[in-house]
Image: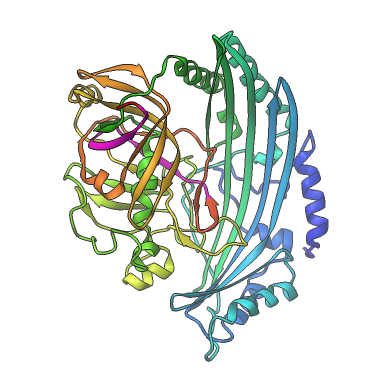
Amino acid sequence: MKPITRRTFLRTTAAAAVATAAVPLIPSGCVSPGGKDSSGYFESEFGITDGLCQKVLSKALSKGGDFADLFFEHTISNYVILEDGKVNQAYSSVALGVGIRTVNGEQVGYGFTQELSEKSMLAAASTAATIADSEPVKSADQFVSLENKNYYPLTTLLTSIPLESKLPLVQSVNDKCFALSPEIIKVNAGFHDKQKRILIMTSEGTKAEDLLPKNYLWTNVVAEKNGKKERAGWNIGGRREFSFYTPSLVNEVAKEAVDRVLVLFEADQPPAGEMPIVLGPGVTGILLHEAIGHGMEADFNRKKISTYCTMIGKKVAEPFVTIIDDGTIPYLPGSLNVDDEGTPGQKTVLVENGVLTSYMHDKISARHYKVKPTGNGRRQSYEHYIQPRMRNTYMLSGEAKPEDVIKSVENGIYVKDVSNGEVRIGAGDFSFYVSQGRKIENGKLTAPIKDINIMGNGPKMLRNVIMVADDLQMAKGAGGACGKGGQAVPVGFGMPTILVKSMTVGGVKS
């Protein structure tokens, strides 16, 4: 197939993406019953042949370097948003291009182009090549296609779902929120879906293709009672089929959002100070992700930024604590069949029985530490360079019962959810706003709380985990993204109920 210009392609695909009866944007049959994308999409649609990629990789290594790679991307994103009972936004975006990287030691040369023409790609490769200054390096003579497992199978392309099928979802969420309570005075709801195709070609001879879906249904609600207003929200999603969004899931999104806002009218500020903290299961894994997980990303350790940089093989927690970063859990937002530099998706044990056993590696850090990459090389888009990033990060269940964890606390705080966190990666210091929680008094959950922060230090918090329950849950949401180095990527996280011996609660009462 003769390559078409990017301008023509974006014009036609964007029109199709917002059409109310959108059609698949690939030749028929490119998604098999198992959801696995057939190979050759970028060649058939854009003329990206192995020979062309060899030529571009040779240009990227024309001044030397350890290796080079190409990252092709075609992403279509759709948004439908309802406010005040009406759908007032429905729009799409399309990204198409290639990023070209040359690695020389721990230095990276990078170029990208939105034009998938030979001329534009060779120019971008020349830019990437300037990081080195030695003799040319030969690229592999041929490419071997990577055989991936599929952790997010699609039987129907997201781009084939018409707008008429999405509108009832957001309208139903809106109606159910209002029906659940007369105190609900405002509802926003929306559905977002993204279909991302990638092709990775490396100078080492790896060829990897993937089709990554991502979607979520969300709502934010405002309630009013006795002249006071409160707001809350909820979302559910992941790397899902559209058929995942059933009427029962719509009910779950609406009920959780309404329950969360109504409980705030009963909430009070607890006293400030040092006290035991129980983190509930599921979404509190964001604390694990932010306060601890980032410190285990290999670039922060290679650069001596993280407090964990000298801790491999040493105790960082009690023996009943095991922490995993996992790209292989079906349908979760952080799962990857292959990472963005061609390493197959896998599971990495970071802390095993209290001992730090591994960092999260991309190829550069893996070479530095003389280990294999762990499949954590990620980027926001073809315009961005690779960084070691988390996927789905969680703590394994322990042996305690959740109710026994709570009973063990005389006076403390139970945290159901947190938001608006700040973390200093080097020191590990953090502060998070508690958006949902309760007091613990005499070993029982009592009054709901609000308007407080919990503060502490990530490594210290990990050392202070003294009980772990047997109720690990992964967070259900997919509306957020993890930021690092100016880039945002989808991640997942999870947690069982745990007891942290002492953390600082910041409030106004003493």
Q: Considering depth in this image, is 413 or 97 the residue closer to the camera?
A: 413
Q: Is residue 292 magenta?
A: no
Q: How many callouts does the rendering have? A: 0
Q: Considering depth in this image, is 72 or 474 the residue closer to the camera?
A: 474
Direction from residue 231 to residue 392 in the image, left or right: left
**Magenta stretch prevailing secondary structure:** strand
Give me the residue at 47% from left, 21% from top: 260
Quarter the C terminus occupies = top left
Visible residue check, residue 24:
no
Residue sticking out furthest to the bottom? 135
- Is residue 139 depicted above or below 217 in this figure? below
Give me the residue at 53% from left, 78% from top: 140
Give me the residue at 59% from left, 26% from top: 219
Visible residue check, residue 198:
yes
Direction from residue 404 to residue 195 in the image, left or right: right
Q: Position of residue 438 (x, y in %)?
A: 34, 22
Q: Position of residue 264 (x, y in %)?
A: 46, 19
Q: Position of residue 427 (x, y in %)?
A: 33, 55
- Is residue 244 depicted above or below 394 in this figure? above
- Is residue 306 depicted above or below 482 in this figure? below
Q: Position of residue 21 (x, y in %)?
A: 78, 34
Quarter the N terminus occupies = bottom right
Residue numbers of the magenta segment: 489-508
Q: Considering depth in this image, is 505 or 70 the residue closer to the camera?
A: 505
Give me the residue at 19% from left, 21% from top: 407
The image quarter in which residue 80 lies: top right
